[in-house]
Image: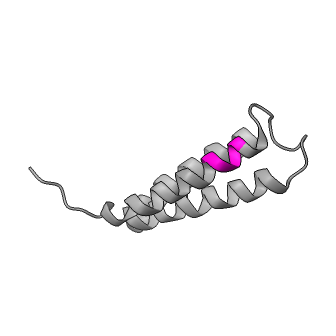
Amino acid sequence: MAYILLVVWTIGICVTAFVWTPRFAVTAMAASFVVFALLRATLPGGVLPHVRGRVFDVTIYMLTAGMLLFLSQWANTPQVF
């Protein structure tokens, strides 16, 4: 079930980039990584697939969210030919 939700989430982020702006899509992705980190930190052990440690996962989610939020400033930059 978790993998199906991740596929739906990925498609939703891609659709958001086309419907609204790429900057909004990247910001929404950063916000969703914060939500993923909170869920990983608070949900019991058997709910999500266990691959790595909980602290490592939360740290990586928060670092990725911070980097995406920083990089979202340039998501609407026009192409240079």
User: x and y percent of residue 48 in the render?
Assistant: 81, 42
The residue that appears at 53% across and 51% down in the rendered structure is 64
- Which corner quadrant of the image does residue 22 belong to? bottom left
Q: What type of secondary structure mainly makes up the magenta span?
A: helix
- Image quadrant in which the N terminus is located: top right
Relative horizontal placement of residue 37, taking residue 46 as reference (left or right): left
Residue 3 appears anywhere in the view: yes
The residue that appears at 70% across and 54% down in the rendered structure is 37
Report the label total.
0
Whether residue 74 is situated above or below residue 48 in the rendered picture: below
Residue extending furthest left? 81
Relative horizontal placement of residue 78, taking residue 35 as reference (left or right): left
How was this image coloured? one colour
The residue that appears at 38% across and 58% down in the rendered structure is 71
Residue 15 appears anywhere in the view: no
Residue extending furthest top? 51
- Which corner quadrant of the image does residue 70 belong to? bottom left
User: x and y percent of residue 3 in the render?
Assistant: 71, 39
Relative horizontal placement of residue 80, taking residue 56 as reference (left or right): left
Q: Is residue 28 magenta?
A: no
Q: Observer-nearest residue: 42 or 12? A: 42
Whether residue 39 is situated above or below residue 19 in the rendered picture: above
Q: Observer-nearest residue: 49 or 16? A: 49
* Magenta region: 56-60
Q: Is residue 57 magenta?
A: yes
Whether residue 14 is situated above or below residue 20 in the rendered picture: above
The residue that appears at 77% across and 43% down in the rendered structure is 54
User: x and y percent of residue 2 in the render?
Assistant: 75, 42
User: x and y percent of residue 81 in the render?
Assistant: 8, 49
